[in-house]
Image (spheres, grey):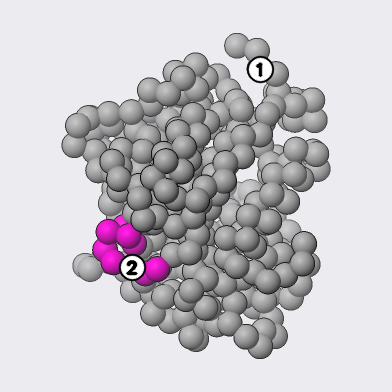
Amino acid sequence: MTYAIDPELAGWAAAIPEFSFTDYAELRAAEQAALSQTPPRRSVVPLDVHDLTVPGPSGAPDVPVRVYAPSGRDSLLPGLLYIHGGGFVMGSVGGFDAEATRISAEVGAVVVSVEYRLAPENPFPAGLEDCYAALTWVAAHADELGIDTERLGVGGESAGGGLSAAVALLARDRGGPHLCFQYLGIPELDDRLDTPSMRAFEDTPVISRPCGELSWAYYLGEGKRGGPAVSPYAAPARAEDLSGLPPAYVTACEFDPLRDEGIAYAQRLQQAGVSTELHLYPGTFHGSTPYVPEAAVSRRMVADQLHALRKGLHVARPE
């Protein structure tokens, strides 16, 4: 199929191979090889960055996290639990280091990025429970992290956006920690794969419907995808009640199989009384921003994200 991709993105779209989750081990190895060649992070302001482990879910291993905080701060800052993407089967804190760095520096927030366990070796609910355990640790250690607990949010991209939505549901249903905001970037939310965009986009750049099929099969376990017993904490689009959730910012890309589930979730949040902002970017494909960061639409997406995070985390800072 031919897609009307933004002219600044089109050349790159043709050159970017579609991820095949068939050999997820090869994808992980490729990511690690790329990371070994990545230059050191750059930041517009000095940051204190350190790695540590926090207690995991009951009976599970500790959870590695990376903490980013603006240096020399003299007051409490907002906090963001950041959850990386990768279709539940790949991705890492290191792979999304630039994103977390940018958010911490330009929003002025303490960002805690989670190295959650990946499927298929660790299917649902392992990764989600790791993220929730990290959230509870952040809330309990807010003073030493320099975080204002009234300005604590959760966010991520792709599978990380879906996990962020699930963490928000868990926090509501388990009675905390309190979240003031959820950032759901191009979120992966629905295992049923029955939206118009998911049915239509069989060969879009980066990911297509076959990727979605494998991603959910790995995350949920063989034979469970689309079945009646799938938990709404695994696939938040299945949640019947979205009331009482924190305000949300949701993004969607035009030529992305995940497009319509993100749009539908944003609409349902709004209908449930949750203040929600939705941005659909024409001419874009899943994850196009880091591939072509200099494109006008990519710059706009980043600027919109940072503005939304400042607003959602109540940062009193001029634009």
Which numbered marker is on residue 276? none
User: Which mark's residue is nearer the viewer, 2 or 1?
Assistant: 2
Q: Are marks 2 and 1 in contact (CB under 8 Å)?
A: no
Left or right: 71 as drawn, with respect to 225: right
Looking at marks 2 and 1 on the same chain, the residue that comes earlier in the sequence is marked by 1
Q: Identify the residue at horizontal 48%, vertical 40% (top origin).
A: 266
Measured as percent of width and height from the top left, residue 170 is found at: 31, 57
Q: Secondary structure at mark 2?
A: loop
Amino acid type at circle 1 is Tyr
| Residue 93 position (above or below residue 85) | below
Q: Quadrant of residue 25?
A: top left
Nearer the observer, 249 or 53? 249
Q: Quadrant of the C terminus?
A: bottom right
Q: Quadrant of residue 299?
A: top right
Residue 171 in the magenta stretch? The answer is yes
Q: Quadrant of the N terminus?
A: top right
Residue 270 in the magenta stretch? The answer is no
Measured as percent of width and height from the top left, residue 21 is found at: 45, 33
Residue 21 in sight here:
no
Q: Secondary structure at mark 1?
A: loop
- Can you identify the residue that label 1 sits on? 3
The span shown in magenta is 170-178
* Most distant residue in the left direction: 229
Label 2: how many residues lie within 10 Å, few (<14), some (14-19) or many (20+)? some
Amino acid type at circle 2 is Gly
Left or right: 46 as drawn, with respect to 78: right
- Can you identify the residue that label 2 sits on? 176
Nearer the observer, 278 or 60? 278
Measured as percent of width and height from the top left, residue 151 is found at: 52, 71
Left or right: 60 as drawn, with respect to 179: left
Q: Identify the residue at horizontal 48%, vertical 85% (top origin).
A: 143
Nearer the observer, 290 or 284? 284
